[in-house]
Image (cartoon, rainbow, N blue to C red):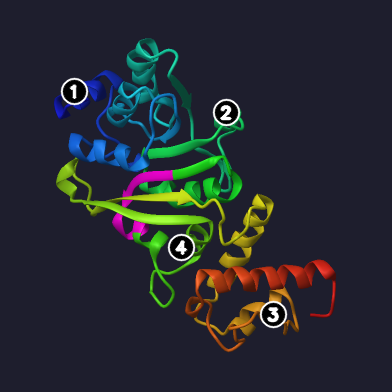
Amino acid sequence: MQTLSEIKELLDLAGHAPKKALGQNFLFDHNLINKLIDASGVTESDLVLEVGPGTGALTVALLDRGVRVVAIELDSGLAGVLRETLGSKFPNQFTLIEGDCLATKRALNVDAVRVLADEEFKLVANLPYHAATPLMITLMTKHPQCTGAFTTIQREVAQRFGAGCGSKIYGTVGVIAQCLGDVEHIATLPPSCFWPRPEVTSAMFGWTRSEKPIAGDDWQWWTVFADLTQHFFMSRRKKISSAMKKLAPGFSHYPDGVSADERIDQLTPMQIESLCRSVQAARDSGEDC
């Protein structure tokens, strides 16, 4: 596993210092790296998607366990280093894709989609903070073969995935995550675990897709559900009836336990999913809602 001095040497080989714009803060605590992998439950020959491998500290630990890794790296200098170091050492386990992890805000990198194909995989990564939320929503709602995600991200972002109704940080990502799977806290990481030190505290958390998710097993519905949920939370301080004006004017068929006078952040993930289904059913029927 890479030491801090080795990480610095590899950055010198890449030809630049850590890039703040790309969120390059390198985790060098071996115990925490192993803790994330252990929590993911991946074993030999399992397939892992890693985003933002950097110098490859986490990547090496995965490869040493016999895991197959598809890594996406945006930094061309680091991509070159990864090809030279890991590509030659692990030719049958390591696949590198150079570029952004997302083709658009709602679509995974097309090369990654091609390489992953329809095989089950897990995301295991120390994610660039700016990419965490859109990437996670994309994997959860558009890639049912992604059976879990185990990541290091900014603590405040991680907390949103497990937030409950009534919380100030309760929102779209939490509802989607909890309707499609189970969220767990793995560890809190102080800035001292990284080089250079970030200005924020980080957290490791895990998300495991449920065999019988609240949102059902129709993955085509998940994207619609995410869009409707986001619409509601854009008006989180207003009554649900107010947010409904653009979605379904005159809508009155609220699910049991849901009132038009409530705010969306007062509803549980299950209630929000039921509300979204009712709205979509009314829109599909073309009825006067």
Mark 4 and mark 3: span between their CA atoms?
24 Å
The earlier-in-sequence mark between 1 and 2 is 1
For the residues labelled 1 and 2, say whether their Cβ atoms are less than 8 Å apart. no
> Three-letter amino acid code at disc 1?
Glu
Where is residue 279 shown, x and y percent of the image? 70, 72
Mark 1 and mark 3: span between their CA atoms?
57 Å
Q: Residue most toward the bottom?
A: 261
Quadrant placement of the C terminus:
bottom right
The earlier-in-sequence mark between 4 and 3 is 4
The residue to which callout 3 is attached is: 245
> Three-letter amino acid code at disc 2?
Asp
> Three-letter amino acid code at disc 4?
Gly
Q: What stretch is highlighted in magenta?
A: 149-158
Mark 1 and mark 2: span between their CA atoms?
29 Å
What is the chief secondary structure element of the magenta stretch? strand
Residue at 43 percent across and 69 percent down: it is 170
**What label does residue 174 carry, if any?**
4
Q: Residue most toward the top?
A: 88
Residue 29 seen: no
The earlier-in-sequence mark between 4 and 1 is 1
The earlier-in-sequence mark between 4 and 2 is 2
Q: Which quarter of the figure has residue 115?
A: top right
The residue to which callout 2 is attached is: 111
Comparing labels 4 and 1, the label whose residue is closer to the camera: 4
For the residues labelled 4 and 2, say whether their Cβ atoms are less than 8 Å apart. no
